[in-house]
Image (cartoon, rainbow, N blue to C red):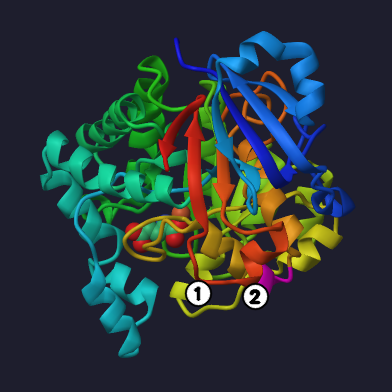
């Protein structure tokens, strides 16, 4: 890739998170952002070529630096591009009428069990052409980018038949090629039991295991395999079967765990060796302990608790018990129609007790580890992809303190300025 070198100068703080590429941060380490004051970042050929003072970088890159385009970050901070490790961004339609129903007393699960919820979006996604699906999802990606997000995970799960699951996964691959945001794919055929299988859910589990998972793996359509393990959706036994079958085919397990009711999803995540268990609003202490012991990352989605008017996950307690935490929007049309990862970081601090520094670690390097990308994104270190977000605040605490604002100033993806 031929891009002009870039240099970011005079940043009040460069949040480097140096030394975090090997594994997700825990406990005290999540507070240690490895900040460089009045720092410089030199970017060449799409990669971070150097991080340090201007003099240090000039002594190594003197001639090359003269050609570089300069970004003056005076009064601002530089962060690793934000990473969202859990989204359902590829879908058609929207569900504001269900929001209204919930505000009139219906619950999320009641709506789903009456054919709405995930089923409603499944209907719209089945009907949509590939072009419509891409067009609608692309708008959300544009908006993610404007909020400083440079990599996301995206799940299927609004098809619940092979044709539409495949369409969603192919749409994600197409969007990955056409859009600056990198997309990492997850197969989530086990998102709901489709109406056709309501009377025989085990037959749908078999369909996923015998037909869909092998096709996902052969077609290299996803890296991860996720299940909505929830009472009335997939039981822990069914979830385990699906996750282990995927694992045999090379698909890494992820779980929607203990979101609405306690259901031993966190325990299951530890048992099957999931890379992450997500939601965890109702996770048991035993489940948290086992996740911590087995290095399963807890992906917390406070936007979902906010939007469903539910109790927030015990983020503070989880960190104190030794779990690595990442943060995500859960971007989807039913339980969290948002792309604002910075707002999620605000919520994580105000509603789950994460410090502003922990929220940053959780939405950058720990999020990168939750999608197996900790080696190439999530921190500002030489050799990593030049994915950077400049925020128009003079220190990182103000990002969370001055809440409800989009402070994103400039976004650099693979060494190119994509938002300015
Ligand atoms: O993560 N819980 C299951 N899946 C999504 C919601 C999907 C939807 O309502 O469309 C979630 O909350
Ligand atoms: Fe989700």
Residue 102 sits in which quadrant?
bottom left
Per the model, the C-alpha gap separating discs 1 and 2 is 9 Å
Disc 1, SS: helix
Q: Is residue 307 magenta?
A: no
Of residue 399 and residue 246, the one placed in the foreground of this image is 399
Q: Report whether residue 319 is seen.
A: yes
Give the residues in magenta: 349-353
Query: Relative to residue 51, is residue 159 drawn left or right?
Result: left
Question: Residue 56's spot in the image, x, y percent?
Answer: 82, 23
Disc 2, SS: helix
Question: Residue 74's spot in the image, x, y percent?
Answer: 64, 48
Mark 1, other Cα within 10 Å: few <14 / some 14–19 / many ≥20: some
Q: Which residue is drawn at the image coordinates 60% and 67% (left, top)?
A: 346
Q: How many marks?
A: 2
Label 2 belongs to which residue? 351
Label 1 belongs to which residue? 306
Along the polypeptide, which appears first: circle 1 or circle 2?
A: 1
Q: Report whether residue 258 is seen.
A: no
Q: Is residue 352 magenta?
A: yes
Q: Quadrant of the N terminus?
A: top left
The image shows residue 321, relative to residue 201, as above or below, that is: below
């Amino acid at each position: 890739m031929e891009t002009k070198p870039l240099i970011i100068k005079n940043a009040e703080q460069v949040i480097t998170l140096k030394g975090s590429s090997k594994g997700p941060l825990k406990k005290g380490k999540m507070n240690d952002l490895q900040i460089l004051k009045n720092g410089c970042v030199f970017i060449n050929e799409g990669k971070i070529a150097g991080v340090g003072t201007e003099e240090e970088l000039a002594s190594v890159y003197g001639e090359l630096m003269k050609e570089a385009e300069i970004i003056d970050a005076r009064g601002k901070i530089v962060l690793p591009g934000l990473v969202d490790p859990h989204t359902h961004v590829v879908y058609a339609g929207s569900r504001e009428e269900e929001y209204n129903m919930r505000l009139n007393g219906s619950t999320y699960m009641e709506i789903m069990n009456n054919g709405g919820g995930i089923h409603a979006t499944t209907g719209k996604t089945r009907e949509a052409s590939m072009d419509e699906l891409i067009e609608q999802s692309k708008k959300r990606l544009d908006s993610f980018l404007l909020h400083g997000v440079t990599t996301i995970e995206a799940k299927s799960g609004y098809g619940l038949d092979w044709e539409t699951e495949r369409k969603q996964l192919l749409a994600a691959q197409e969007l990955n090629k056409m859009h600056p945001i990198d997309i990492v794919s997850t197969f989530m055929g086990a998102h709901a039991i489709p109406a056709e299988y309501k009377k025989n859910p085990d037959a749908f589990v078999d369909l996923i295991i015998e037909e869909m998972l092998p096709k996902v793996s052969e077609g290299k359509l996803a890296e991860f395999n996720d299940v909505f393990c929830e009472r009335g959706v997939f039981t822990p036994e069914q979830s385990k079967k699906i996750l282990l079958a995927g694992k045999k085919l090379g698909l890494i397990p992820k779980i929607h765990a203990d979101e609405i009711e306690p259901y031993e999803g966190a325990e299951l995540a530890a048992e099957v060796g999931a890379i992450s268990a997500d939601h965890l609003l109702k996770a048991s202490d035993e489940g948290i302990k086992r996740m911590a012991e087995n290095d399963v990352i807890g992906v917390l989605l406070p936007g979902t608790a906010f939007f469903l008017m539910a109790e927030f996950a015990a983020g503070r307690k989880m960190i104190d018990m030794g779990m690595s935490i990442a943060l995500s929007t859960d971007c989807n049309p039913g339980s969290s129609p948002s792309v604002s990862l910075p707002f999620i970081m605000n919520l994580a601090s105000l509603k789950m007790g994460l410090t502003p520094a922990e929220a940053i670690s959780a939405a950058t390097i720990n999020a990168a580890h939750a999608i197996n990308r900790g080696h190439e994104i999530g921190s500002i270190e030489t050799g990593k992809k030049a994915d950077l977000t400049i925020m128009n605040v003079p220190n990182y605490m103000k990002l969370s303190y001055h809440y409800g604002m989009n402070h994103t100033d400039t976004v650099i993806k693979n060494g190119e300025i994509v938002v300015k």
